[in-house]
Each structure stands twice: as structure tokens, then as C-alpha cells.
Image: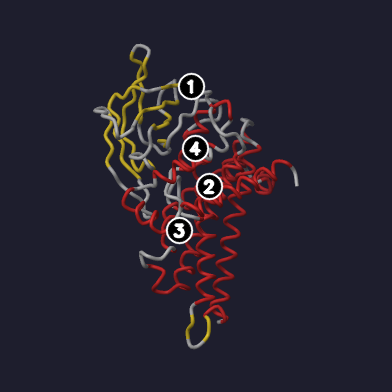
Amino acid sequence: MNSATEIRTMLCDAATRLFADHVDQKMLAAAKHDGWSAALWKELEQAELPLVGVPEDAGGAGGSLSDAAAVLRISARHAAPVPLAETALAGWLLASVGLKVPRGPLTIGPVLDEKLTAVKDGTVWRVSGKLTRVPFARIAKQLVLLADSAQGLMVVNIDTTEKHAECRITPGRNLGYEPRDEVVLDNVAALAAAPAAAGITRASLQARGALLRAVQIGGALEQALHLSCEYAKQRVQFGRKIAQFQAIQQELARCGGEVAAAVAAALSAAGMVERLTNDHRADAVQQTLMAAAAAKIRAADAAREAVAIAHQVHGAIGVTDEYALHHVTLRALAWREEFGNEAYWSMTLGRAMLAAGADAYWTALSAA
């Protein structure tokens, strides 16, 4: 075992203990109303987990994208109600242009075709535009975004505990009860700005976001499978535990296959993106895009199948508020649609393969 693997193993052990100790049914129920858990975030910050994968010279905890993916996978298993993926994305953007990553929860935007402009006002850049379904906007202290200007990357204060006449946030949520808010910026002064670095575009941001959502889906499905197996070993029907019925065994085996495929696709893609992070050649960019696309497609497809099986195994109890299953299954289904659903990424992948041409097809396919 090499040193990187040993460090990741210790990181995963520490993260698993932290989430197991601090995430419980009471916290998750409260987070459905509050949008998140401030107490859990405090514990995560003390352990430096939100900034794993961000270089130390940028204010992060160090480590690789694969390290960050490992922590994110564990957090998703526990349905941790915190903006861990969003803060990781924002940290990556800031570090890529040499800006320091601040403490506190962060969020990002936009990744789609929403218009966002920035104009120079003396020494200050001012940002205007409307963003929809911004994750954890009402929770985040700062919003890191890519504006339609030469300066590119901006940091805007959206802390709702302070008064910002130029910034309005309308609360919303996704299927998993996580905040997905509308943010309207009206000539808001940027706290910091920098030209976007090579390879930092809305497309690359969406691809990395899709990759992290694929990792989260994998983690959530692992927990759904675990809960289903445990329930099947306890539930008695017709005088036998339902785990003894061949039909249930077959469905759980099929669920396990879907979960394993989703996790493998996500972690493999994370490894490829990590290896090619600083390679801005066209073929390297294409490989990272294809890897992220394949991971999101496979994870989203697995979510549809695995969630259905998990709820079928559980029967009526699987949809009750007091049982843990819905916390992970609803998040997995919600994450399918974010940063592009499987239809979007299938079209993107198909167009990329057509553009590469027949001669490059096998090379591109085997590299992904």
C-alpha cells in the first residue's frame, strides 16, 4: 500500500467516524426544515474536511480530487445536510486562479446558460444577473461565479445574516429537501475577481459538478442497499425472513450490481480527471469531459433502478418520515437532475464521439 492510499484510508476512517457520531435521524429531520445543519458544518470545518482536495497554499487542506471524492461519498452515505460538494467546487475554482479560499460554506454559479454580467466601476467589479436553483445559496457566505466578462471569476458576498439591498434570495428546494434558491444580483460589488484560468469554463465547471454528483449518488445508493439488506434480514413474512426468498435475493443482487457500477464509474472518472487536471490539450479536455459524462450517466441510471428496488424491498415503511431510507433515496433522485441529467450527458457524449470521428472512436472509448 503506497503512502497516498494509506493517507486516503486514514482520511476515510476519520470521516466515517465523524459522520457516524454526528448525523442522526433528529438532525436529518431538522435539516428538512432548516436546509442544513450548522452544528455538523462546524464539526467538518474543525476536521478540515470541506477543503480536502484544495491546495494548502490556497487555504485548503491539501489532498487530491480522489481524496475529496472519498469524503463526499461517505457524506452522501449519511445524507449529510451540508454544502460539501458545493464548497469543494468553489474551492477548486478559487485555487485555480490563485485566490484564497475563505472559511465557511460556499456555493457556485452559474453552470447553464443564465446571463451574468460584470462591469468595472473604478477598481471594483459589479455583477448583475439572475441565477436559478443555486445550491445552498441561503446558507452560503459567498458565491463564486463565472461572469460574462474578461475578468471571468468573481466572488460575491451573499450572507443572508447581513443586509444586501443588491442581492435577493428566494428560497427553493430539490426533491431531497436541500436548498436550491433563486439569486438575483443587482450591481453587486465583487469581493474579489480574477481572469479565469486555462481550462476553467462553464462547461468544465458543469462537468466537474456532474462528477461530484455522481460520487454522491454512489454513496447514497450504497446506504440504500445496506438498509435494504438489513431490513430483509429482519422482516418476517409468511413465517420466514424475506431475505430467504429467492425473488428478494435476486432483486438485492441486481441492486448491488447497479450500486457497484455507479461507484466504480464515479471513482474511475475522478481518477482520470485528477490525472489530467493540468493538461489543457484538446484531447485531454475531451477525455475528462467524457469521463464525467459517463460517470453521471451511469450513476443516474443506477439511481433509477436501485431506488425502486430499495423501496420495493422495504414496502410501506420505505416511504415513512421516521425511517432513514428516504433521506438517501430522495437525494439520489434529486442529484440525477443536477449539473445535467443522463439525457443531457448522453447527448453531449454522443456529439463528442461523432465529432471525434470513426478512426478515433475506439481510442476515445477505451481511454474513458
Q: Quadrant of residue 282?
A: top right
Which circle marks residue 328 in the picture?
3
Residue 202 locus on image (x, y percent): 47, 34
> Quick one: SS at disc 4?
helix
Between 340 and 45, the one lying in front of the other is 45
The answer for how far apart the CA atoms under marks 4 and 2 are is: 12 Å
Amino acid type indicated by mark 3: Val
**Crowding at label 3, few (<14), some or many (≥20) Cα neighbours within 10 Å?**
many
Residue 240 locus on image (x, y percent): 53, 85
**Crowding at label 4, few (<14), some or many (≥20) Cα neighbours within 10 Å?**
many
Q: Are marks 2 and 3 in contact (CB under 8 Å)?
A: no
**Residue under label 4:** 89
Between 24 and 99, the one lying in front of the other is 24
The answer for how far apart the CA atoms under marks 2 and 3 are is: 13 Å
**Residue under label 1:** 195
**Residue under label 2:** 72
The answer for how far apart the CA atoms under marks 3 and 4 are is: 21 Å
Sequence-wise, which precedes: disc 3 or disc 4?
4
Q: Is residue 241 left or right of residue 141?
A: right
Q: Nearer the viewer, mark 1 or mark 3?
A: 3
Q: Are marks 1 and 4 in contact (CB under 8 Å)?
A: no
Amino acid type indicated by mark 1: Pro
